[in-house]
Amino acid sequence: MMNIGRRPTLRAETECSIEVNILNFEGNLYGKEIRVEFIKLFRPEQTFPDLEALTAQLLRDRNFVEQLLN
């Protein structure tokens, strides 16, 4: 699951960042090279009223991605 954008709910950064969440993985990949493939764009970046609303949406996103990949 990946976000490419400016993180408007948390920081409203001016530069884009890429954040990849590898589902069902525990470990440290900082400093490692990984390959990421796009499968489907399913939601544009949004601003949420608070962190709680963002967290709830991320759980829905995760469920969607898990169903998509299974």
Image (spheres, rainbow, N blue to C red):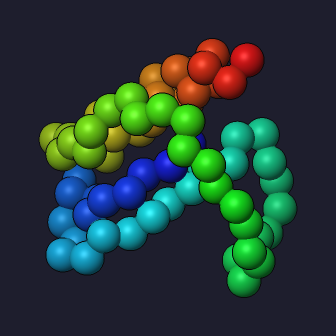
**Residue 66 visible (yes or no):** yes
Q: Is residue 38 left or right of residue 10?
A: right
**Residue 56 visible (yes or no):** no
Q: Is residue 29 left or right of residue 41?
A: right
Q: How many marks?
A: 0
Q: Nearer the viewer, residue 62 or 10?
A: 62
> Residue at 26% of width from left, 63% of height from top?
6
Q: Is residue 6 left or right of residue 22?
A: left
Query: Which residue appears farthest toward the bottom when viewing the image?
Result: 31
The x and y percentages for residue 28 are 79, 69
The quadrant of the rendering that contains the N terminus is top right
The quadrant of the rendering that contains the C terminus is top right
| Relative vertical location of residue 33 with respect to residue 69 in this rendering, above or below | below
> Residue at 18% of width from left, 45% of height from top?
47
The x and y percentages for residue 53 are 30, 34
The x and y percentages for residue 22 are 69, 48
Q: Is residue 69 left or right of residue 5?
A: right
The x and y percentages for residue 59 are 50, 29
> Residue at 21% of width from left, 42% of height from top?
46
| Relative vertical location of residue 29 with respect to residue 67 in this rendering, above or below | below
The quarter of the picture where residue 10 lies is bottom left
> Residue at 74% of width from left, 75% of height from top?
33
